[in-house]
Image (spheres, helix red, strand yellow):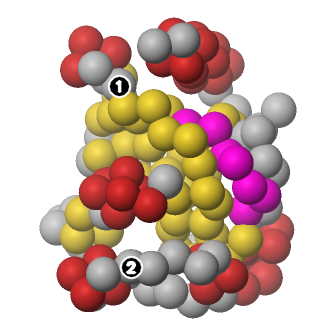
Amino acid sequence: MQYVKFGSRRGKEGEIKLLDIFYNHNIVFAEVKAGVQKVKEKKFFKGTKIMIADGLTTVAVAIAKTDSDSLDKFDIKFNKNEIERINISDWVIAAKVKIYKLKEEDYFPATIGKFYHIKNKDKIKLIDELIEKYSKE
């Protein structure tokens, strides 16, 4: 089982916010340093469990409904406001997801980063517990 983290802010000060796009389109995405080849190397699969952070706070968990691919491979109808905030290209890793928005009492800390694979056993356990809890609601 794979676990990954997606951050929803971009820019030097986190001024570009993407969380609404994630929620509106049931998708997560992040630019991958070193481009197209890294998108292939960082691949994750349908069923991967995901934490979604807004700044340094995890505000949602999700399950990948598709294998990851580059954002340009997904047929998403972004509106003008959304298009101004994102790069739709082959070096942006993305996946369609089922998102579970957390209640504030279930928020937990996240580390800085747009995208990474999670290895921390405590964080993995917490993600599993929250997906279990919210998928029953």
Marking on residue 52:
none
> Residue 64: within the magenta?
yes
Q: Can you say whether 43 is above or below 92 in the image?
A: above
Q: Nearer the viewer, residue 91 or 130?
A: 130
**Label 1 crowd (10 A; few <14 / some 14-19 / many >=20):** some
Give above or below for 31 relative to 112.
Answer: below
Q: Amino acid at mark 2?
A: Phe
- How crowded pointer 2 is (Cα within 10 Å; few <14, some 14-19, many 20+) is rated as some
Rendered location of residue 12, percent (x, y): 24, 72
From the viewer's perspective, tell me whether residue 128 is left or right of residue 104. Answer: right
Q: Which residues are magenta?
A: 62-68
Q: Quadrant of the N terminus?
A: top right
Give the quadrant of residue 77.
bottom left
Give the residue pinned by disc 2. Answer: 78
For disc 1, the marked residue is 102
Please tell me which residue lies in front, 112 or 81.
81
Residue 93 at x, y = what percent?
63, 70
Alpha carbon distance from label 1 to label 2: 24 Å
User: In the depicted view, which residue is nearer to us: 123 or 71?
Assistant: 71
The reply to whether residue 35 is in sight is no
Residue 129 relative to residue 77: left or right: right
